[in-house]
């Protein structure tokens, strides 16, 4: 074993020295030729899915799944090739040939990565393996499960479940255009997390194509690799083709509300009380809080709180529950709307009331922004004086919003090592810092990114420390990068501990075993272990 790792370390080094130099034209042609020569069924010619920059459709294929306009600039690095795989053999060819000709593969499913890691790179010879054509969804209500290909969107998953049953669901994110591939690979959370945990807590099988081009399922990949690709980020380990998910039951009628409060004499107390109650509600209630800044009627900038609820039960029960435990919010029957679970998905993503459910099948987001996101974990309520300080700073900064996602419930009962996602018991909230803007340009982006970082900075006394934890699906390159995998373990440790805490070591073990030459690498991939000293 030792000799093996030592050897592969040197191979990886040699490999990566050449990463720094752009591939020669002949190397590029050889890569394309390799793809064209790969044994592929005649019914699925690979030439039909290859987009080089001189193809007239190249730009539109590239832009179709760019979900952060910050990476849609003319200065954003562009892939040498896009492969819109239609068949497993296309993925196998992409892996085998990219490995042989030293091209970096970026795997893109829904393209929602906050830092564009699935479609931009500083590597001079990178290409995109685009998964959007591979999006079959097979729901079996009899088995209360479904096989879902990674190019599917969450909206498609929800729609296909609801098409067959109004009492089955899936716990995943609230934005319907998010892709299954990145979302499940990175954990996946949504408004049923307190009841059913994360997406990955409900995954029972998977299919992956490994670095040697082999198609493996849970049994043939083994429990370590299966564990790693259910929360450790699929892209460090292979190309995930599909996941098999369990479909938890929900009542035929659920209840939602959205209420807003602006700053007044009771505001601080309201937000403080929210922190005490939200992580301790019954598992059926998820109450999200978003703080932002708006112009008051008198034209002054002021703090605003938006509370949005999903309750897996009736409006009547929700009113009595909140009256008993959170009277300060003043929820009345008139605030509550009863609907089916799938309609609640539309409500949560801000579709107008009455929008037909098939809006979930649209792969085009309602709105696209230039954006920056960051995350944090809260383990003790932010004290009232701290809240007052943050409210003032938010008014100064104006643009970043701050969302509290309550933990507790099932999230606190699942062991921290069950999945690579480590943020379980002991957390009250996951925070999301979000800034959206509308103008292109690097200086403009710097300005808004700085504001986001500033709010994150002001929160330092109130959030987790050593490590300052972060959520992989809220990709944030500020917390460290491994410079495209050129090194390795030491750099990977920096962001790895924040995303995975004590699970990082096991991820590195799995990575070293399944991809010792670090072919599947990106700005924040799991590194291989450094050479062991003899
Ligand atoms: C509007 C919006 C709302 C969001 N809401 C939520 C939310 O409610 N809850 C939540 O948890 N997250 C949320 N996210 C974050 C989201 O879960 C992550 O960005 C997720 O990675 C997106 O998946 P994707 O397939 O769309 O992304 P991509 O950009 O395609 O991929 C993200 C990462 O996964 C890798 N990857 C993708 N597909 C595969 C594959 N088949 N095999 C191996 N690796 C793969 C990519 O290489 C990349 O590293 C949201 C993001 C946005 C933009
Ligand atoms: C672009 O690529 C597609 C898919 O391979 C192909 O069908 C089409 O003919 C190409 N177009 C051009 C202009 O090369
Ligand atoms: C992305 O950039 C291209 C090229 O500048 C532009 O045509 C396109 O409209 C942009 N996409 C969005 C959604 O703004
Ligand atoms: C879905 O079912 C069809 C028909 O049985 C099968 O060909 C396909 O491979 C299945 N897809 C998935 C993702 O399981
Ligand atoms: C604050 O709450 C108290 C008691 O609930 C209420 O009487 C008062 O009107 C509230 N003040 C403001 C400014 O809303
Ligand atoms: C508030 O008003 C100012 C000036 O009218 C405007 O520039 C700003 O964009 C507004 N802010 C918000 C959050 O609406
Ligand atoms: C972006 O522009 C749209 C349309 O003008 C506007 O509705 C929206 O509020 C703007 N968003 C931001 C973040 O400025
Ligand atoms: C953003 O912050 C950096 C570092 O503090 C600074 O150098 C830069 O000038 C800032 N940019 C803007 C546009 O404020």
Image: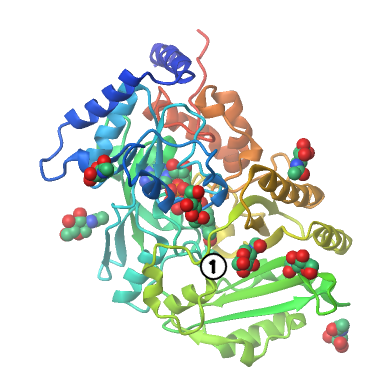
Camera-side residue of 372 and 481: 372
Q: Nearer the viewer, residue 32 or 227?
A: 32
Ligand 6's image quarter is: bottom right
Q: Position of residue 232 (x, y in %)?
A: 48, 42
Q: Position of residue 305 (x, y in %)?
A: 73, 72
**Image quarter in which the N terminus is found:** top left
- Residue found 36% across the figure and 48% down from its top: 61
In x, y percent, where is residue 44? 16, 44
Q: Is residue 171 above or below residue 253?
A: above
Q: Is residue 181 above or below residue 256?
A: above
47 or 382, which lies in front?
Answer: 47
Determine the secondary structure under disc 1.
loop
Taking the image as drawn, is residue 405 in sight?
Answer: no
Binning the other alpha carbons within 10 Å of mark 1 as few (below 14), some (14 to 19) or many (20 upward) gives: many
Q: Residue at x 68, y 59 (%)?
A: 428
- Please tell me whether residue 194 is drawn above or below residue 256 in the rendered image: above
State left or right for residue 519 relative to residue 440: left
Dot 1 corresponds to which residue?
191
Taking the spot 51% from the left edge, 86% from the top edge, the residue there is: 338
Work out whether residue 56 can be spotted: yes
Furthest-top residue in this view: 534
> Which quadrant would residue 407 be assigned to in this image?
bottom right
Outermost residue to the left: 42
């Amino acid at each position: 074993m030792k000799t093996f790792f030592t050897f592969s370390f040197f191979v990886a080094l040699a490999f990566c020295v050449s990463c720094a130099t752009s591939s020669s034209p002949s190397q590029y042609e050889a890569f394309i030729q390799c793809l064209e020569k790969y044994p592929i069924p005649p019914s699925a010619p690979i030439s039909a899915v290859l987009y080089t920059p001189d193809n007239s459709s190249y730009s539109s294929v590239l832009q179709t799944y760019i979900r952060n306009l910050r990476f849609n600039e003319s200065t954003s690095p562009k892939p040498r090739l896009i492969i819109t795989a239609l068949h497993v053999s296309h993925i196998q060819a992409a892996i085998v040939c990219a490995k042989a000709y030293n091209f970096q593969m970026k795997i893109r499913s829904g393209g929602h990565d906050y830092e564009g890691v699935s479609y931009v790179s500083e590597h001079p010879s990178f290409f995109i393996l685009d998964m959007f054509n591979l999006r079959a969804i097979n729901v079996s209500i009899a088995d209360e499960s479904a096989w879902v290909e990674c190019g599917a969107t969450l909206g498609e998953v929800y729609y296909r479940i609801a098409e067959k049953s109004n009492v089955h669901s899936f716990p995943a994110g609230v934005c319907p255009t998010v892709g299954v591939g990145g979302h499940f690979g990175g954990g996946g959370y949504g408004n049923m997390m307190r009841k059913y945990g994360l997406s990955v807590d409900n995954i029972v099988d998977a299919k992956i194509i490994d670095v040697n081009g082999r198609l493996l399922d849970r049994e043939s990949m083994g429990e370590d690799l299966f564990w790693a690709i259910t929360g450790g980020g699929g892209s460090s380990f292979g190309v995930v083709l599909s996941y098999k998910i369990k479909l938890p039951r929900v009542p035929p009628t659920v209840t939602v509300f959205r209420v807003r409060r602006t700053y007044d004499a009771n505001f601080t107390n309201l937000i403080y009380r929210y922190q005490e109650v939200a992580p301790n509600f019954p598992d059926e209630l998820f109450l999200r809080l978003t703080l932002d800044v708006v112009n008051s009627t008198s034209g002054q900038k002021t703090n605003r709180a938006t509370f949005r609820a999903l309750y897996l039960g009736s409006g009547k029960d929700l009113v009595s529950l909140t009256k008993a435990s959170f009277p300060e919010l003043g929820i009345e029957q008139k605030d509550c709307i009863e609907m089916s679970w799938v309609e609640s998905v539309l409500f949560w993503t801000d579709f107008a009331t009455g929008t037909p459910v098939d809006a979930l099948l649209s792969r085009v987001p309602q709105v696209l922004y230039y954006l920056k996101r960051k995350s944090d974990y809260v383990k003790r309520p932010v004290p009232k004086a701290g809240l007052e300080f943050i409210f003032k700073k938010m008014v100064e900064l104006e643009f970043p919003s701050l969302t509290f996602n309550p933990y507790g419930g099932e999230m606190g009962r699942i062991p921290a090592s069950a999945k690579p996602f480590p943020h379980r018991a002991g957390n009250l909230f996951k925070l999301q810092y979000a800034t959206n803007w509308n103008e292109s340009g690097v200086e403009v982006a710097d300005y808004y990114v700085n504001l986001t970082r500033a709010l994150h900075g002001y929160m330092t006394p109130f959030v987790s420390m050593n490590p300052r934890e972060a959520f992989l699906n809220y990709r944030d390159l500020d917390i460290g990068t491994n410079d495209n995998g050129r090194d390795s373990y030491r750099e990977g440790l920096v962001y790895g501990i924040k995303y995975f805490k004590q699970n990082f070591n096991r991820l590195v073990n799995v990575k070293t075993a399944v991809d010792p030459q670090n072919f599947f690498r990106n700005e924040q991939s799991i590194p291989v272990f450094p050479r062991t000293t003899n």
